[in-house]
Amino acid sequence: MNSADASLSAPSSTVSERATPREWAALAVLTLPVLLISVDMTVLGFAVPHLSEDLAPTSVQLLWIVDVYSFVLAALLVTMGALGDRVGRRNLLMLGAAGFGAASLAAAFAPSAEVMIAARALLGLAGSTLMPSTLALIRNIFRDNVQRKFAIAVWSSALAGGSALGPVLGGTLLEFFWWGSLFLINVPVTALILVLTPFLVREYRATHPASIDAVSALLVAAAMFPAVYGVKKLAEHGPALLPVVSVATGVLFGYVFVRRQLRSENPMLDVRLFTIRAFSVGVWLNLITLFTMIAALFFLTQFLQIVLGISPLWSGLALLPGLTLAIAASLLAVGAAARVGFRGTLTAGLALMAVGFMVLTQLPQGSAAVAAVGFAFICFGMGLTQTLTNDAVVGSVPEQRAGAASAVSETGYELGAALGIAILGSVLWASYSSKLHDVPGVPGGAMESARDTLGGAVQAAESLAPDAANGLVSAAHIAFVDAIHVTSAVAAGILVLAAVHTAWTLRGSTTV
């Protein structure tokens, strides 16, 4: 650890402060919001075909339905992390749980794509209070380093467990109920959080909390939204003046935000945390792993349900082995790091994810097995990295900064999920559209709808003569699988570069 690392890292405790049974019970409660958010993130992928049919969104609206939640959440996490340090992390957790339940009801009964986008944005607002609160509270509750690492491994496995539960639960609900039931399942979980948290989780506030700076909060949002919008448009349509200016505007506001924090005596976010190598690598890898994994889930659920015609329930079961491996990898990560080191375990996890995407570049037209194998590699590699990155973030900073550190970590996590859909999703649709050529007997309007989304192709085929319909669906399926090959190759390349960068950045490092 260099001098910057040492000056900002948490001091080692000379007294073992072992957790009590109540604190282990509190950990169980703190896994509920993580399950809630991870289920919500993965279950939505299974609803995409059904949302496309009932709400008839355009391709851009469909992308916003999926990722606006993460954009709003990422823009507010830093502010909410600082707010939790001031008003109490438990208080903020309970407020967010109540809001998440209410927004879930609005999403469940959304009558249009526009209302669904608004409801998902409200879910992001409520969700921004949950994730940093849970991770910061774990940092507060578990003072012993060994117990903290295990607690974060449990937290990370709950994150992976929610991802595993989402497809199976979503598939089961869609087998028997309408897509709104996917949001209604959030309501009893939020009620359970509200009932149990006051009894089992103690309140924690920072002794010297960061200031709640309204200007800084606005700067974060002003940096986030133009940059993300510009990246989305560049991915969809290529270089153009408006998206380039939008990205530049976001970067400019981000620069102003950083300068303001450096000049403040009590900054909302201490950007010097990024001089800690373990912290900065942890945030970066949270972004990269979710960027690629969520994109894979986005296109594989459509492949299984629309291309292969598998029911939602069996589609979820096809992905369950990989997502279950993510839970196992989360619990194995601490032991693996003790044997081969922090750097070696992270690099191996990224390499395994890259292998999974390389498998998907060879995905045949009709094989659920190859899809499941590729996804298993992706999830196992992600599980290895997530436990270590989250412990790196909260374990490498002083306790007083746990809320801010957790918020930055989750910003990387949620922004990665959003950008995965925005960028890799746009790569997928651009490739699909370019590969879907005119089909004999299909009029221009139907071809235009078919090129918009895969669901649009299926809907357009319903109004055509049998030969033209079969030709259109077949061509759309071939184009979509080809697009998966292209998108998977891009994701694999990104992960290889991330593995090389991680190995280089952490050279000489042993443990967090």
Image (cartoon, rainbow, N blue to C red):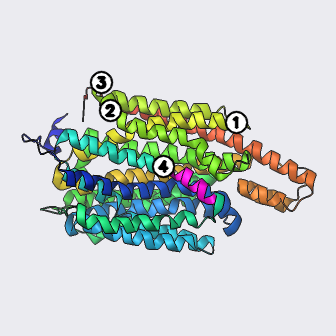
* Label 2 secondary element: helix
Q: Characterize the local packing of mark 1: few (<14), some (14-19) or many (20 or more) Cα atoms within 10 angstroms.
A: few
Name the amino acid type tagged 3. Answer: Arg
Say whether residue 401 is left or right of residue 446: left
Name the amino acid type tagged 1. Answer: Ser
Q: Which residue occupies the foreground of this view, 438 or 169?
A: 169
Extreme front residue here?
21
* Label 3 secondary element: helix
Residue occupying image coordinates x 31% and y 30%: 335
Q: Which residue is mark 2?
A: 505
- The image position of residue 281, as x and y in percent, is 33, 40
C-alpha gap between disc 2 and disc 1: 39 Å
- The image position of residue 192, as x and y in percent, is 37, 65
Numbered disc total = 4
Q: Which residue is mark 1?
A: 367
Asked whether residue 45 is in view, the answer is yes
Say whether residue 8 is left or right of residue 196: left
Q: Which residue is mark 4?
A: 163
Q: Which residue is mark 3?
A: 339
Sequence-wise, the earlier of marks 4 and 3 is 4
Residue 90 sits above or below residue 153 on the image: below
Residue occupying image coordinates x 48% and y 49%: 163
